[in-house]
């Protein structure tokens, strides 16, 4: 299972990086979405795949029983997803605005900076 | 899909989605759910309105400006940590109490629930700000005096 | 106030004021005053924290009462407290400069709440005691900076934000991978706990690999060679107040994080990391200053200088001696003030000339003598000319390099200092000294004036520089004590893990 997930993580990273290298702002955003998902999956995989109970002390007991899942990586992943969600929503708004402003989806249009310094 | 179906579904689903969002938010202290998921679910209710009836209608349904909603949520969430601080404990320490109810035993209430309410509002507000903000910036692109 | 209150107050104040500011009616003055008062409060809390830490040692608090290493820890040693104080002072400066320069419509919008969120994120990053929260605060800060950059939504700003944002998100991906992998190897992310666990770990190679992830991620945030491309692509587009805020705080968080993890956590492989940091620092200095020499846009020139100065900091970190870390801290403080002063002055000159292009300027020495003086002092200070703060900071770096017998770094630092002086003199010659270009378009209907209160913040920054230069001794002593704490993490670990109330 670990091997399968590791390969998936690798494939997602590769796909994300490939998207970043295309000359398209929308694919840039999609690439970052893929990279974010790949990272979350990586966090999930490296921190141990285990089938366990929620780490809550059952009523009437003193300590945790049985195989229980480590809550910390899950908290990380949840937080990372939230942050990723927020930033990507922001990025999409930005991409949308830029597309409206420049009328194109091509990253090579984003070169006004270079044109300025050529003067 | 014809607009009639879309409109009917949107009108019917909105209260259901909002109710489910509240249920999710309330039950989520130690079972799946919580303020974040609840807030997102509520945002889908308004997003559905936007798809069916357009952006102005969804904005009107929300009543409050989304960023204000998010700000209010952030304030509530931060505020839930203050009582503990005033009591000399660390910020965000939980304080639990019993709320006696006439019809049953008593309800356990505490500052973490207040925190969840804050998260709910903040997530709803932020998500709606993004959804409604698509294609429209915060301000108009007025020419400004640079510097 | 208890240490726990002092530690959490900067963050609570900023985020609370940001939320309250957004709830206020859309008018300029209530938001402005709320922001000013909050920044003042952050500076005061920072000063109190610094005094407390100086007197009683490292302070730590566990949020929510969950003991370390399980809960959310806030820690302040001298470096953190000093940086929170400087952050508050910079916030105050930038808000008062914004009040003087920005149009009222922008002030009435989301501008001040965003600035407050950014400052809150920066304070959080300086004060947090675990790596995951460091990631979270860096993201909070970056999120606010993305919106601030694109707030005016002019085309070049949108383009700059896309570049800045995609590169920053790449950096965040690397950082998050590093955090996840480190947790997988060490089983904790609390900095103090890590500093205990890592030396005894049985997977040194894996840890070295993870430390390289951190190096890449934080070097990108700091704007170090070869990962600085986002910086000159974006810093010249927002209003001068925003550029000042970014230049003063954003890259410093990256430097702080590098300093923190390579003195506290990954100390085992110091040979490798220190070589890498030295090479990186040297190349950053050189590429930054060479980029600056080639520029004729005032703000882009200054942006390249940010990179070049970051190089000094990273090289000082690479030397990893007490003298070098002292130099790093003194340099960091000096450089935040010097760079901010220059960006503020560049904004003021642009108000007079309505351009950042050095070709188009001229004669400001005669028309704006005070402005010229306010440029001259920080420019000399940045280049490292006595008696201003930059001289002592740079001298300390070079001395540390000489003492470590690292001639390459010492030589590079001297040469880069000269090139810095050269490019500062270029601005002086072009903007202030030479006669204005003949074909300058005259717009008699718009009088060219500075406006009220623009020079105040610039003067404050310049005054700091003179004070820190003439009275360098107290700062150096403080920096020395802070460096001592960095090199001996025992007190830090004791404060976090020792079960202090």
Image: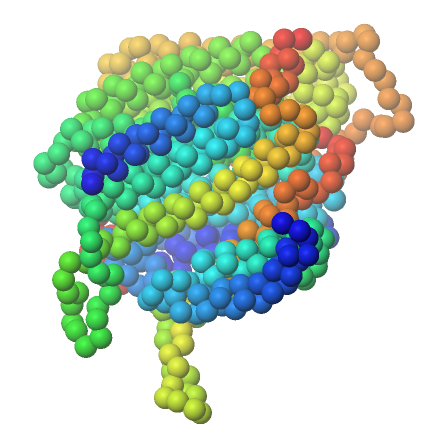
Confirm whether residue C493 shows in the render: yes
In the image, B16 versus A42, the foreground residue is B16
In the visual, does C33 lie left or right of C351? Answer: left
Q: Quadrant of the C terminus of chain C?
A: bottom left
Q: How is the image coloured?
A: rainbow
Confirm whether residue C463 shows in the render: no
In the visual, does B1 lie left or right of C118? Answer: right
Residue C268 sits in which quadrant? top left
Q: Position of residue C252 (x, y in %)?
A: 43, 33
In the image, C315 versus C322, the foreground residue is C315
- Number of labels in the image equals 0
Q: Position of residue C405 (x, y in %)?
A: 24, 14
Q: Residue at x 64, y 30 (%)?
A: A99
In the visual, does C262 lie left or right of A99? Answer: left
In the image, C313 versus C180, the foreground residue is C180
Q: Position of residue C244 (x, y in %)?
A: 57, 32
In the image, B146 versus C86, the foreground residue is B146
Q: Residue at x 64, y 38 (%)?
A: C151
Residue C365 sits in which quadrant? top right
- Report the residue that reaches farthest toward the right: C445
Q: Residue at x 81, y 7 (%)?
A: C438
Q: Position of residue C163 (x, y in %)?
A: 53, 26
Q: Quadrant of the N terminus of chain C?
A: bottom left
Q: Residue at x 83, y 15 (%)?
A: C441
């Amino acid at each position: 299972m670990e091997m399968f997930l590791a390969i998936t993580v690798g494939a997602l990273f590769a796909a994300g990086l490939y998207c970043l290298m295309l000359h398209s702002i929308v694919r840039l955003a999609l690439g970052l979405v893929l990279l974010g998902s790949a990272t979350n999956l990586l966090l999930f995989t490296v921190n141990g795949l285990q089938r366990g109970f929620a780490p809550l002390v059952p009523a009437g007991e003193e300590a945790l029983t049985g195989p229980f899942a480590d809550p910390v990586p899950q908290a990380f992943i949840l937080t990372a997803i939230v942050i990723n969600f927020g930033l990507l929503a922001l990025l999409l708004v930005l991409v949308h605005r830029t597309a409206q402003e420049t009328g194109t989806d091509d990253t090579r249009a984003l070169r006004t900076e270079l044109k300025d310094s050529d003067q | 899909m014809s607009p009639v179906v879309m409109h009917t579904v949107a009108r019917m689903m909105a209260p259901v989605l909002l109710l489910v969002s509240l249920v999710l938010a309330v039950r989520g202290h130690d079972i799946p759910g919580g303020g974040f998921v609840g807030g997102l679910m509520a945002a889908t209710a308004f997003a559905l309105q936007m798809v069916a009836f357009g952006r102005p209608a969804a904005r009107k349904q929300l009543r409050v400006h989304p960023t204000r909603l998010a700000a209010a949520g952030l304030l509530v969430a931060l505020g839930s940590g203050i009582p503990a601080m005033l009591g000399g404990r660390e910020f965000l320490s939980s304080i639990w109490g019993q709320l006696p109810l006439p019809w049953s035993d008593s309800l356990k209430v505490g500052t973490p629930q207040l925190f969840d309410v804050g998260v709910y509002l903040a997530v709803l507000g932020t998500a709606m700000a993004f959804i409604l903000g698509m294609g429209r910036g915060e301000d108009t692109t007025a020419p400004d005096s640079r510097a | 106030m208890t240490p726990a209150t002092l530690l959490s107050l900067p963050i609570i104040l900023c985020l609370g004021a940001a939320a309250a500011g957004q709830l206020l009616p859309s008018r300029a003055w209530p938001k402005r005053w709320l922001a000013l008062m909050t920044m003042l409060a952050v500076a005061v809390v920072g000063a109190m924290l610094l005094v407390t830490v100086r007197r009683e040692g490292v302070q730590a608090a566990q949020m929510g009462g969950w003991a370390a290493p399980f809960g959310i820890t806030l820690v302040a040693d001298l470096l953190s407290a000093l940086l929170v104080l400087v952050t508050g002072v910079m916030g105050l400066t930038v808000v008062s400069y914004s009040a003087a320069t920005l149009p009222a419509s922008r002030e009435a919008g989301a501008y001040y709440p965003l600035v407050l969120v950014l400052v809150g994120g920066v304070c959080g990053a300086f004060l947090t005691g675990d790596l995951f929260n460091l990631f979270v605060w860096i993201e909070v800060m970056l999120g606010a900076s993305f919106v601030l950059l694109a707030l005016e939504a002019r085309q070049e700003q949108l383009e700059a934000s896309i570049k800045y944002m995609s590169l920053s998100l790449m950096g965040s991906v690397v950082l998050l991978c590093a955090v996840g992998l480190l947790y997988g190897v060490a089983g904790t992310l609390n900095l103090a706990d890590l500093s205990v666990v890592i030396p005894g770990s049985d997977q040194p190679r894996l840890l070295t690999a993870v430390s390289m992830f951190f190096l890449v991620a934080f070097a990108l945030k700091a704007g170090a060679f070869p990962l600085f491309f986002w910086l000159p692509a974006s810093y010249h587009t927002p209003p001068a107040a925003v550029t000042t805020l970014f230049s003063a705080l954003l890259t410093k968080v990256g430097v702080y994080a590098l300093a923190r993890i390579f003195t506290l956590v990954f100390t085992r492989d110091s040979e490798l990391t220190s070589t890498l940091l030295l090479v990186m620092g040297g190349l950053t200095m050189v590429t930054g200053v060479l980029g600056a020499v080639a520029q004729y846009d005032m703000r882009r020139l200054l942006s390249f200088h940010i990179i070049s100065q970051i190089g000094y900091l990273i090289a000082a970190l690479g030397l990893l001696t007490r003298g070098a870390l002292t130099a790093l801290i003194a340099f960091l403080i000096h450089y935040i003030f010097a760079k901010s002063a220059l960006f503020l002055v560049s904004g003021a000159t642009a108000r007079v000339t309505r351009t950042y292009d050095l070709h188009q300027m001229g004669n400001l020495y005669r028309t704006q003598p005070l402005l010229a003086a306010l440029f001259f002092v920080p420019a000399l200070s940045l280049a490292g000319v006595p008696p201003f703060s930059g001289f002592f900071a740079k001298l300390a770096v070079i001395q540390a390099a000489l003492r470590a017998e690292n001639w390459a770094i010492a030589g590079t630092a001297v040469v880069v200092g000269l090139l810095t002086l050269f490019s500062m003199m270029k601005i002086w010659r072009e903007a202030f000294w030479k006669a204005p270009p003949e074909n300058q378009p005259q717009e008699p209907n718009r009088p060219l004036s500075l406006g009220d209160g623009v020079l105040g913040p610039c003067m404050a920054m310049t005054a700091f520089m003179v004070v820190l230069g003439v009275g360098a001794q107290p700062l150096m002593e403080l920096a020395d004590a802070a460096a001592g704490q960095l090199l001996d993490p025992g007190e830090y670990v004791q404060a976090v893990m020792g079960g202090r109330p």
